Image: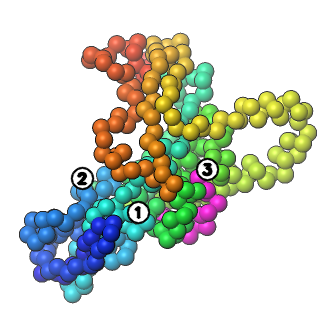
Amino acid sequence: MRNFRIWRGDASSGALEDYQVEVNEGEVVLDVLHRLQATQTPDLACRWNCKAGKCGSCSVEINGMPKLACMTRMSTFTADETITVTPLRTFPVIRDLVTDVSYNYVKAREMPAFSPPPDLAPGEYRMQQVDVERSQEFRKCIECFLCQNVCHVVRDHEENKLAFAGPRLFIRAAELDMHPLDARTDRKEHTRDRQGVGYCNITKCCTEVCPEHIKITDNAIIPMKERVVDRRYDPLVWLGRKIFRRDQVEQQAAAEDTTPAPASPETVTHRASPGQVNWAQEIQVPPAPAVGPDGRFAMSEVLIDRAGAPSPFGDDVTFPVDPEQLRYLHPRTDED
Ligand code: SF4
Ligand code: SF4
Ligand code: FES
């Protein structure tokens, strides 16, 4: 038998409750939560899906440390230790160990998507292996939001959530800014002005808790800060701005003025391509939900049946899909 102390309650009130529960060799904290549900507290709310450290659902705080419950072995605690399990502190509690993490999704929606150059046809996507590897580190993210939870900028400062996107989104910004096929030129400005990278003071807490061991600060935040500073304060760039003719500066400003419009129902027209792909078909982008003054949207928004993104095959198609209808093709191997 082991001692557990678990936070029970909802948005209005709650308290830590003590339990004694059987633990078997090789078990993880999530196993024990499931045993509690099966034997003592059938109404204990906790989120989980994969039980393999890959879905990012079971994030909680265990003895005050943000962790995945399914990857925290019981053998790491001493036999007489009381194990305290509490919900993530940075996000509002829904019930027991389940929190409302919609803040992260709102911030993700604000991030302009990957934008390849307009004249690049499918099949012409070529990258050096070193560029692939750089992105792949960031693509390991399982969206557990432990890094967002531990970041002091928002952990005890609800008011910063409007201006600060957090480390999970900084790695996305870095991935796109370092991507050789991303044609947007305003990533650095977006990270500075819309994501609030200046709030981060490189405490590295986010890196410490990341279960995927992504070097969030060293490989994403610090390079992005350097890129922001290079763009804004480099004396050569400043001099270049001064000596450009006005019409050149205006042309450049127009080219760089790609600030994302506020989310609204709209139609995206994809570019035409000389390849087999119909890039010209129009796709309805679903409307974004209304965001409240606190930076979140209502919980009902994540519960309704809303399409996450347009289907690459369009609506109402039969399979196999006609290649003319595809918006993306892998490079043809016979040309490699
Ligand atoms: S390094 Fe920056 S983003 Fe990461 S936890 Fe610290 S302040 Fe937050
Ligand atoms: S960067 Fe790491 S800690 Fe942050 S959400 Fe992704 S996997 Fe989780
Ligand atoms: S249940 Fe999927 S990461 Fe823990």
Label 1 lies in ligand 2 vicinity (Cβ under 8 Å):
no
Viewer-proximal residue, 288 or 5? Answer: 288
Residue type at numbered disc 1: Phe
Q: Residue at x 25, y 85 (%)?
A: 81
Which of pointers 3 and 2 lies earlier in the amino acid sequence? 2
Question: In the visual, does 219 lie left or right of 74?
Answer: right
Look at mark 3 in the image and give the residue it sits on.
Answer: 194
What SS does tag 3 mark? Answer: loop
Look at mark 1 in the image and give the residue it sits on.
Answer: 91
Q: Position of residue 220 (x, y in %)?
A: 56, 54
Residue type at numbered disc 3: Arg
Q: Residue at x 61, y 50 (%)?
A: 194
Q: Position of residue 168 (x, y in %)?
A: 48, 55
Residue 33 visible somewhere in the drawing = yes
Label 2 lies in ligand 3 vicinity (Cβ under 8 Å):
yes
- Neighbor class of circle 3 (other Cα within 10 Å; few <14, some 14-19, many 20+) is some
Whether residue 202 is in magenta: the answer is: yes
Question: In the visual, does 59 lie left or right of 153?
Answer: left
Q: Position of residue 204 (x, y in %)?
A: 53, 67
Look at mark 2 in the image and give the residue it sits on.
Answer: 49
Magenta-tinted stretch: 195-207
Mark pair 1, 2: CA separation: 20 Å
Viewer-proximal residue, 159 or 142? Answer: 159
What SS does tag 1 mark? Answer: loop
Label 3 lies in ligand 1 vicinity (Cβ under 8 Å):
no
Mark pair 3, 2: CA separation: 32 Å
Disc 1 + disc 2, Cβ < 8 Å: no
Q: Residue at x 21, y 87 (%)?
A: 80
The circle drawn on residue 200 is none
Q: Quadrant of residue 7?
A: bottom left
Viewer-proximal residue, 113 or 42? Answer: 42
Q: Position of residue 268 (x, y in %)?
A: 51, 25
